[in-house]
Amino acid sequence: MILQPVDYVLVAWFALAAASTLYVAIDQFRNNPEPAVMRWGFILVTLYMGPLGLLLYVLADKEPRMGEHEQFTAPLWKQGVGSTIHCVAGDATGIILAAVITASLGLPMWLDLIVEYTTGFVFGLFIFQSLFMKSMMGGTYWENVRKSFVPEFISMNFMMAGMAPVMSFLMMGRDMRAMDPTELIFWGVMSLGVIAGFITAYPSNVWMVARSLKHGLMTERPKGSRFDVKPRQEKKKAHAAHEAHAGHGMMSDATTPQIAALGGVSLIALLIGMVAPANWVNLTLSAREVGGLVMPRHMAMDRDTPADAMRDMSYVDPRKATASYDLGAKGDRELAPRVENGVKVFDLTAAPIKWTILPGVAVDAYAYNGEVPGPRLHIHQGDRVRINLSNKLPEPTTIHWHGLILPNAMDGPAEITQAPIKPGGIYTYEFTATQHGTYFYHPHAKPDRTQALGLYGALIIDPANAADEAPADREYVIQLQEWLMREGLTYPAMPMDGMQPNYFTINGKAYPSTETIPMKLGETLKVRFIGTNNGFIHPMHVHGGPFEVVARDGETIPDSARFQADTVNVGPGQRYDVIWKARERGKWLIHCHIPHHTANNNTEVKGGGGLMVVIDVQ
């Protein structure tokens, strides 16, 4: 599934890589007088490097006309390309195979890099260099291992010095799908890493070819084959130079100090490439812990950020949504219970969904019963209630009944009063409602993540004695929420760097898609403000005159203590019941008095956005 713009680029890149590899494979075996090992080398490198591999083949190795391969490939820079191809084809194959295996095993990134280096070196030395090139190098297999060890060591060090930082920074960056071999971006990072490795290994390979420490490009014209042609007379000198670089028996003129110095520099480069990224990213984490996560851009992440924090702050995977709801879908719908032996029973299911908050703007949310907010539970003081919660989320959850007096085992804090409900699990809460007023329910397992993504709902308890609650002609519940959506992905909004919200909703919709409250002149409206949001205090203001604050946090305020106001600061978890009178006809706003919270992604639509509701008095 395409999640990010980079995925389109990757699809195009790998389509080009496949076409390039197909061309190189066909042309190598049909038209180019190369030994088999070089043919496969160019094929593998083109598979890993895409069109860049094709470019290297055409510019450095493809015979332009029959009989001209020896002269065409003679320049030292082309011989260096061939030598680097030897290195990259074998070493990168080992590195990529190791990366897939270590990701599957859940090894930490630092150990992953060591295993990749070791596997790449072993594969390159013992298989690609010493085994596949044995017929050209002559001698026994172990003689070739001995001869190839130092050149392979130097080349591999420089190659991994280029690959390691690319893999570390991109795999442990904000899009950690790059750690998961089932994701296309993993292979994109591998491709980019191989390109970087080729670039860093190339200069040393040019020098080693010049000093006859490594083979470069070669020409093979088996007798009786279509390549069995004599090079043109005028090319004999170039052919002789070519054989000096690529011949079977090589006598190097490199001195021991030169080889030792180059080897030492390659080792320093390798250590820098492997170790330096640990200053910026947490290399102790594994693909099993954080693979597949995507972080919001500019989020504060450093070498000490733990896996738990990354999981809490990461996106909601839209591929896991169980349903999609358009703008007409409503949250906070009252859920009718069934009665079993005098107990009111409610069934709630928590699952990921796609929820539309504005025309053309849909968030990936967690929801109870496919609603944001979750269904309203409306009961009476003294009721015995039972709530069955089914968890279809990709992570554990619980429910906390905010502000209620109930048995400790029913309170909901994960690891405190109950074990978290695992994905696929069911848990039953049962208690007697001894209070009355405005309450709400929300998760108490990773609430900074799961509540911020939509898991909350109103719990309204009518008093046993109607006189215990302030009456009004109409009633409206307002549940507040903050959202963070960037580049088509939804993250839990938090008051921290890179996690600040850019959308705000009342009852799951942002203005101008919030409901309009109809009233008649002279009527009273009870507004139940509920701080179902996580991160901010919202000063909720009503136009058209002051209101009377009649209840706070579920407790009715005595007549003598009630007070007039036009703004109440609703913090996370707080509730206020206020009664407002329609004194004049017209359209009157209820809104947050922080202007940024009345905008949609920093823009206004039809006079505002976000936390705004209109009261229409006729």
Image (cartoon, helix red, strand yellow):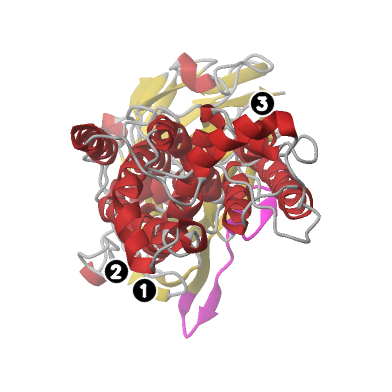
Quadrant of image for the C terminus = top right
Q: Residue furthest bottom?
A: 341
Q: Amino acid at mark 3?
A: Pro
Where disc 3 sits, the SS reads loop
> Residue visible at 55% across and 70% down?
337
Where disc 1 sits, the SS reads strand
Q: Is residue 342 magenta?
A: yes
The residue carrying mark 2 is 410
The residue carrying mark 3 is 512
Q: CA distance from mark 2 to mark 1?
A: 7 Å
> Residue visible at 29% across and 35% down?
254
Q: CA distance from mark 2 to mark 3?
A: 39 Å
Mark 1 crowdedness (10 Å alpha carbons): few <14, some 14-19, many ≥20: some
Mark 3 crowdedness (10 Å alpha carbons): few <14, some 14-19, many ≥20: many
The residue carrying mark 1 is 430
User: Which label's residue is closer to the chain start, 2 or 1?
Assistant: 2
> Residue visible at 53% across and 35% down?
79
Circles 1 and 3 in contact, beta carbons < 8 Å: no
Residue nearest the observer in this picture, 511 or 278: 278
User: Which label's residue is closer to the chain start, 1 or 3?
Assistant: 1
How many marks can you see? 3
Circles 2 and 1 in contact, beta carbons < 8 Å: yes
Q: Amino acid at mark 1?
A: Glu
| Quarter of the figure with residue 386 | bottom left
Vertical position of residue 108 compared to residue 192: above or below: below
Q: Is residue 414 visible?
A: yes
Q: CA distance from mark 1 to mark 3?
A: 39 Å
Q: Magenta segment, which residues?
A: 318-344
